[in-house]
């Protein structure tokens, strides 16, 4: 084995948390090494993979590599070893830039009460920080990502400054819904999103390709490679196709070394003053648990027995219908507006809150959209002209509403190490026990009623409600922050209670999930923690 590499800070994972932290730390003059399990993505190849894929799931643009296996939506039992009683349905990528390659781009903030659900509603736990503590970093994150939004609406989350970019234009469907629902309790507002509405950061504005998931063909949608380039320009090093398999502490609990395995199975080590885990809410607890030893038999950072626990998502209630009049979906970003005023209220004592995403992608998610419809119409014996007329008539009326519901943290929703199966590096696969509780299911039931009311206003027909939840792709919990080391993994600065030079970034530190898509909160927390680490190196003022 060669001599260990050296750095001031080692960051495991090159997604948005790792990329933002690396940029801020490198620009402060620290020696940064980013270790990424996957390889770089060729955007043109990813677009072609998407076009060629027979099953167009969110991961289809990124073929699974045996050296960096990630879960896929159509084969959830391959990587995840599922115990149930419910299947965990959300996924992530192992590529340079992480899951921001196939995210939607939605950049909502949590609302203030999301940080105090135990105090306000007797549910979940309180965060050790408040919305006010995080608000300046939310604004920094919006500017860092280049979020397009309507600054005249705070969507329940008070702001100290405007969005950097003007909002993405709302679609004909959005305007139709806003007009139709104008005298109801449903408020249709433009959705803040990390998608260029104008030329910004040497990237073009959105051209409406309608393939945000799984890949933006022109990088109008932000992905973490934008900040990886900035980090590398400031001196950070990126070591891709290398999987960290173990963290090694000294007798005092300080992490001294990270062992990693390359795709060719050669092994390396890196030593640093500080280690940051930014490898998502499944891989982070997996690595901590796999680093167990005689001195740390429960795994690292796990004196509280909370590593891997409190796994959350935003269980999705999907509903679709045919509007009476055309609304012209299948154009523009996959969503440009939502109904955000259902995310908070005293009802949260009894059932979950949710936000309603208005889909511009018609029936693509629930049914596959126009392609299976064309096959169905053709089976009726329609000639070419009749088939074309029927297809245009129906697809112009496709509606899709998606309620992303709040899920409470539960200790038994847990990621552990599978006792039987291992990856190519000998690390046990993630074993998942998961259940969607009655609190979330009651929210889904109310969402179905709301969807039906909205469809009724549009005089829609052929109304369908998915009988079971979908995954939102929002993997949260598993290494939650808290002020009490007995009940949490990291403190309010995302530093491990057990290891004073180990930090955890990403949605794994969320004590609760609220209803906001988590990426902007991940970004804000990462910038906040990066500032803490910079100050730690610089010492007292």
Image (cartoon, rainbow, N blue to C red):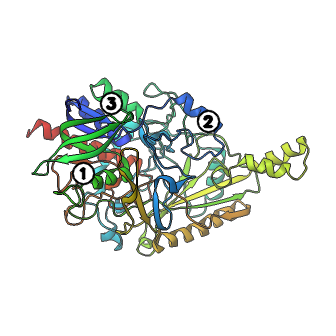
Q: Which mark is residue 494?
A: 1
Helix or strand or loop: what does disc 2 sit on?
A: loop
Q: Which residue is mark 2?
A: 209
Q: Which residue is mark 3?
A: 238
Which of the two marks, 1 or 2, is nearer to us in this view? 1
- Disc 1 and disc 3: Cα gap in Å? 23 Å
The quadrant of the picture occupied by the C terminus is top left
State whether residue 465 is above or below residue 526. below
**First along the sequence among labels 3 and 2:** 2
Helix or strand or loop: what does disc 1 sit on?
A: loop
Label 2: few (<14), some or many (≥20) within 10 Å?
A: some
**First along the sequence among labels 1 and 2:** 2
Q: Residue at x 41, y 31 (%)?
A: 226
- Disc 3 and disc 2: Cα gap in Å? 31 Å
Q: Residue at x 68, y 50 (%)?
A: 368
- Disc 1 and disc 2: Cα gap in Å? 38 Å
Say if residue 158 shows up in the picture: no
418 and 324: which is toward the camera: 418
Where is residue 23? Give x, y as percent. 30, 33
Q: Residue furthest left?
A: 540
Q: Residue at x 67, y 62 (%)?
A: 455
Label 3: few (<14), some or many (≥20) within 10 Å?
A: many
């Amino acid at each position: 084995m060669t001599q260990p590499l050296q750095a001031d800070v080692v960051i495991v994972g090159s997604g948005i948390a790792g990329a933002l932290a690396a940029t801020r730390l490198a620009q402060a003059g620290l020696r940064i090494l980013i270790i990424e399990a996957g390889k770089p993505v060729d955007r043109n190849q990813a677009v072609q993979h998407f076009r060629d894929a027979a099953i167009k799931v969110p991961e289809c643009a990124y073929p699974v590599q045996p050296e960096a296996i990630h879960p896929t939506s159509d084969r959830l039992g391959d990587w995840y070893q599922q115990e149930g009683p419910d299947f965990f349905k959300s996924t992530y990528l192992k590529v340079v830039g992480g899951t921001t390659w196939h995210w939607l781009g939605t950049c909502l903030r949590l609302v203030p009460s999301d940080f105090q659900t135990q105090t306000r509603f007797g549910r979940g736990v309180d965060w050790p920080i408040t919305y006010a503590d995080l608000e300046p970093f939310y604004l920094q994150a919006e500017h860092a990502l280049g979020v397009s939004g309507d600054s005249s609406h705070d969507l329940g989350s008070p702001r100290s400054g405007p969005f950097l970019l003007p909002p993405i234009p709302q679609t004909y469907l959005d305007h139709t819904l806003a007009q139709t629902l104008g005298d109801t309790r449903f408020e249709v507002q433009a959705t803040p999103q990390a998608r260029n509405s104008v030329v910004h950061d040497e990237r073009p504005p959105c051209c409406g390709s309608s393939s945000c998931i799984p890949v933006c063909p022109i990088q109008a949608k932000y992905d973490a490679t934008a900040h990886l380039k900035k980090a590398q320009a400031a001196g950070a090093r990126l070591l891709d196709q290398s999987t960290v398999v173990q963290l090694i502490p000294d007798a005092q609990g300080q992490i001294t070394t990270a062992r990693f395995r390359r795709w060719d199975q050669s092994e390396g080590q890196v030593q640093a003053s500080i280690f940051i885990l930014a490898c998502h809410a499944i891989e982070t607890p997996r690595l901590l648990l796999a680093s167990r030893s005689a001195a740390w038999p429960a795994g690292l950072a796990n004196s509280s027995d909370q590593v891997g626990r409190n796994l959350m998502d935003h269980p999705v209630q999907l509903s679709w219908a045919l509007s009476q009049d055309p609304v012209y979906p299948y154009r523009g970003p996959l969503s440009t507006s939502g109904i955000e005023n259902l995310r908070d209220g005293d009802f949260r004592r009894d059932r979950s809150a949710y936000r309603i995403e208005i889909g511009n992608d018609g029936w693509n998610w629930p049914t596959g959209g126009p392609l299976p419809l064309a096959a169905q119409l053709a089976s009726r014996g329609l000639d070419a002209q009749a088939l074309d007329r029927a297809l245009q008539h129906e697809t112009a009326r496709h509606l899709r509403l998606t309620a992303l519901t709040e899920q409470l943290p539960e200790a038994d929703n847990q990621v552990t190490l599978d006792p039987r199966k291992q990856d190519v590096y000998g690390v046990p696969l993630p074993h998942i026990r998961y259940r969607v509780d009655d609190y979330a299911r009651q929210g889904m039931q109310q969402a179905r009623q709301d969807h039906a009311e909205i469809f009724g206003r549009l005089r829609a027909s052929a109304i369908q409600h998915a009988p079971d939840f979908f995954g939102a792709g929002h993997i949260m919990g598993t290494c939650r922050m808290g002020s009490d080391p007995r009940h949490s993994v990291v403190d309010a600065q995302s530093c491990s209670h057990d290891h004073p030079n180990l930090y955890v970034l990403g949605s794994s530190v969320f004590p609760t999930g609220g209803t906001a898509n988590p990426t902007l909160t991940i970004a804000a927390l990462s910038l906040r923690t990066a500032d803490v680490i910079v100050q730690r190196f610089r010492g007292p003022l």
